[in-house]
Amino acid sequence: MADLLIELFSEEIPARMQARAREDLKTLITNGLVEAGLTYASAGAFSTPRRLTLAVEGLSAQSSPTREERKGPATTAPDAAIEGFLRATGLTKDQLDIRDDKKGQTYFAVITKPGRPAATIIAEVLESTIRSFPWPKSMRWGAGTLRWVRPLHTILCLLSDEAGAEVVPVSVDGIASGNITRGHRFLAPDPFAVTGFDDYAAKLKRAYVVLDSAEREAAIWQGAQNLAFAAGMEAVEDRALLTEVAGLVEWPTPLMGRIDDSFLHLPPEVLQTSMREHQKFFSARNPKTGRIEGFITVANTQPADGGAVILKGNQKVLTARLSDARFFWENDLRVAKAGMGEWLDALDTVTFHNKLGSQRARIDRIAALAREIAGVVGADAEVAEKAARLAKADLRSSMVGEFPELQGVMGRYYALAAGEDEAVANAARDHYSPLGPNDAVPTEPVSAAVALADKIDTLTGFWAIDEKPTGSKDPFALRRAALGVIRLVLGNRVRTNLTTGALRFAADLIGPIENSFADVNDLLSFFHDRLKVFLKDQGIRPDIIEACLAMPNNDDLTLLVKRAEALAAFLKTEDGTNLLQGAKRAANILAQAEAKDGVEYSFGADIKFAETDSERALFAALDTAQAKIAPAMQAEDFAAAMSAMAALRAPIDAFFTDVQVNADSEILRRNRLNLLHRIRALCAGVADFSKLEG
């Protein structure tokens, strides 16, 4: 067995492309080796700004021999057909086998190929991988034809075993493979030879290169925390920035500076966003004041002066950037204190969608819808409408124009500056939420009303113009909007019938649109599809959801989920699974009899015709259960209803053990079938058991 080391050394690879490139290199190489007949034990991919590396352990020395049989033409076939078969197989006629076939004697070719050395296969796979590598963007340079993300300088390709290491000869556009790599661009630029992965990783570290991106991330974060702690502050966690910065440096050295006092009055989100977007700085927060008062930069070097010169340069650039942010903030405050009317008027000229009008028209719809929804979430209708009218005003602010990710966040600050109360300001901040499965759900009543209105208007609007998601395509993020509505409804325990309430109201606000219409029932089905995905992630089986969707009021999502959760818990019990079997057996017998007789057995079960104790016990159990289930269902106490149903398990089991339903006596048969109908009807009042598995 041998080990393989590959390094593709180039100019700097964009940080955002490195993780995908690592996985692509690993997949393309290992799949290529396996398809060519080699096996391996393990593989690991690594990246730094200037290199992609793959280490493969336990690689077989050569591929296994192969034997392939191909059926050819009949021995009586024309010469041209036989000659074509010989050309395709590379054999001569005397090398073919003649075998008896259904239609007579037929030629067969047995093609045996010996195993090939690993080095030969590696060379082919590596060249193909380099030439077809799936970079999102690539470039050509010089006179060559090779495309790479940045100019490729060297290829390291080593195959090593107990006997030593050998260079696998590969040449791509004049770049020949070798055993040479380089360290840090400035701290250790000289080339050096390696003999295998362990030697490679150790020598890289001595040459100021940390190969593993996870190790670089850990070093950066630990260093940032230590620096912040020493300054009496705390580093603000930013996982995406940490991954990006680790892709920008090979030898990370965190350095900390302080923000000039003249900028400390800016909102912390502004400081953090400006430093992250423009300079890739981490923020340091003073826990006593809650303000962002420091920054942490990561140098790709080991400065002799402790980083003084680097920090001085960064401080100068930071001052310029934050001066811009301060100008935006102060200019925006002037408009906000005047009531934000300037921004709202400007939204009249901003198109939301060419078929759905301007942003101002959309705000009018959202405001009316928020007023309509307010009651079901416990919000004041006037406040909800006002909040909806102001929630998107910050879209025309200078700060959001510079940093779009601050929309909503800045809206809160500007609403407060305009003298609005906390509920209105918080709604501006929260109405985009939840943005994803891990985002918090707004629970303040006004925020919930505006957030629901925003998402429902989006959904009904795009449904009205027939811009629905198809397959994997969802350009307007409608699946995310529907999931947001579901989480808002469930998180706030909202009780409302969507099709006769908010969806219908929103569709009426949009009004008739040429060649299209808002199909509310179709949109409800879309909600149900998203709800299935959501509840499946919560551990509720799809068939349970289907059984509950078949019940009335399935557009009341809170009621629907409450029913599904209770049914799921019930079916996890022994009584639940056994009752399901009994209910299904009753339904099947009843369906067969009704089909055979052409009648519906849905009334007339009378205890006076009961002949056995088991029959009489089932009558009594059904009476008792019905007396408990009916009020429980009325009170939406599904757990109590399921508990009452559980008591039916033993009487139903005993009935089927002791009683022959299809008795010789027609009177007994009809009475027993009508008794089975009572079981079916009682279960159907809780959920559609026919849709349940098992």
Image (spheres, rainbow, N blue to C red):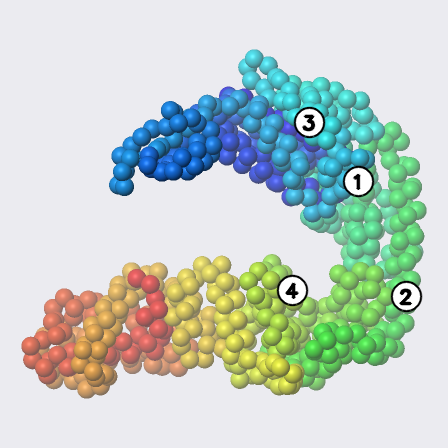
Q: Nearer the viewer, residue 372 or 493?
A: 372
**Left or right: 113 with respect to 370?**
left
Question: Foreground: 656 or 521?
Answer: 521
Q: What is the CA distance from the residue labelled 2 to the residue labelled 3?
A: 60 Å
Distance between mark 4 and mark 3 Cα atoms: 43 Å
Which of the marked residues, 4 or 2, is nearer the chain's N terminus?
2
Is 141 situated left or right of 676 in this image? right
The number of callouts visible is 4
Tag shown at residue 475 = 4
Tag 1 residue: 298
- Residue type indicated by callout 3: Ser
For label 3, the residue is 171
The local secondary structure at tag 3 comes to strand
* Front-lying residue, 398 or 424: 398
Task: Please say whether residue 667 is visible from this viewpoint.
Answer: yes
- Dot 2 or dot 1: first in sequence order is 1
Circle 1: element type? strand
Residue 235 image offset from top left, x and y in percent: 75, 47
Seen at 59% across and 80% down, the residue is: 518
Q: Quadrant of the C terminus?
A: bottom left
Q: CA distance from mark 4 to mark 2?
A: 35 Å
The residue that disc 2 covers is 330
